[in-house]
């Protein structure tokens, strides 16, 4: 029975990590450091493996927990460390060189392209964080 409890605990820990991350996504510390839930998936996988090792007789709940938490660990790791990586910086623009064309949203959310203003009037580009 101990293996089944470890299996249930591991799945609950993994599900709790997902729920906590979704509920706390607006908190900058959580949003900027998502590796916390990947660590929770690894701990959950460890609990499930421990359930398999301690199980006598019926081990299938622990094996299911190993499969679920292992899949979550792989998916979470792939998402955070491969898919959601910050893209590399492009080539730096030299002083005096024309700026490359880009499109960004204006204050009202409408897309504005640098090409629309090239040769017509000066352009001042201001980046602000907007966390206030």
Image: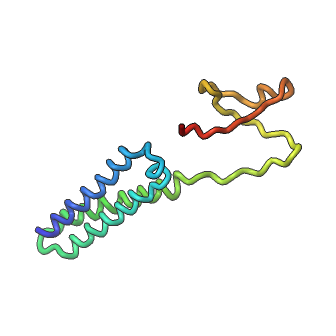
Identify the residue at horizontal 11%, vertical 72% (top origin).
57
Q: Would you place residue 114 above or below residue 97 in this image?
A: above
**x and y, in percent, of residue 115 in the image:** 78, 29
Quadrant placement of the N terminus: bottom left
> Within the image, what quadrant is residue 116 found in?
top right
Indicate whether 118 appears above or below 5: above
Taking 65 as reference, is 130 left or right? right
Identity of the residue furthest to the right in this view: 96
Q: Residue at x 20, y 66 (%)?
A: 6
Q: Residue at x 17, y 69 (%)?
A: 3
Colour mapping: rainbow
126 lies left or right of 17: right
Q: Classify 106 as above or below 10.
A: above
Q: Position of residue 15 (x, y in %)?
A: 29, 53
Q: Is residue 18 left or right of residue 1?
A: right
Closest to the observer, 120 or 45: 120
Above or below, 112 relative to 72: above
Q: Position of residue 35 (x, y in %)?
A: 44, 59
Look at 70% across and 36% down and name the residue there: 126
Lateral position of residue 2 relative to residue 48, left or right: left
> Which quadrant is the C terminus positioned in?
top right
The mark total stands at 0
């Amino acid at each position: 029975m101990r293996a089944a409890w470890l299996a249930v605990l591991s799945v609950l820990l993994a599900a709790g990590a997902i729920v906590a991350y979704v509920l706390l996504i607006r908190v900058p510390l959580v949003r900027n450091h998502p590796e916390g839930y990947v660590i929770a998936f690894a701990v959950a996988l460890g609990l499930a493996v421990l359930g398999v090792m301690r199980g006598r007789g019926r081990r299938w709940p622990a094996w299911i927990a190993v499969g679920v938490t292992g899949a979550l660990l792989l998916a979470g790791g792939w998402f955070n460390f491969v898919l959601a990586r910050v893209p590399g910086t492009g080539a730096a623009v030299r002083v005096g060189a024309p700026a490359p064309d880009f499109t960004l949203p204006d204050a009202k959310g409408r897309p504005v392209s640098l090409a629309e203003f090239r040769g017509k009037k000066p352009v001042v580009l201001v980046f602000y964080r907007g966390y206030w």
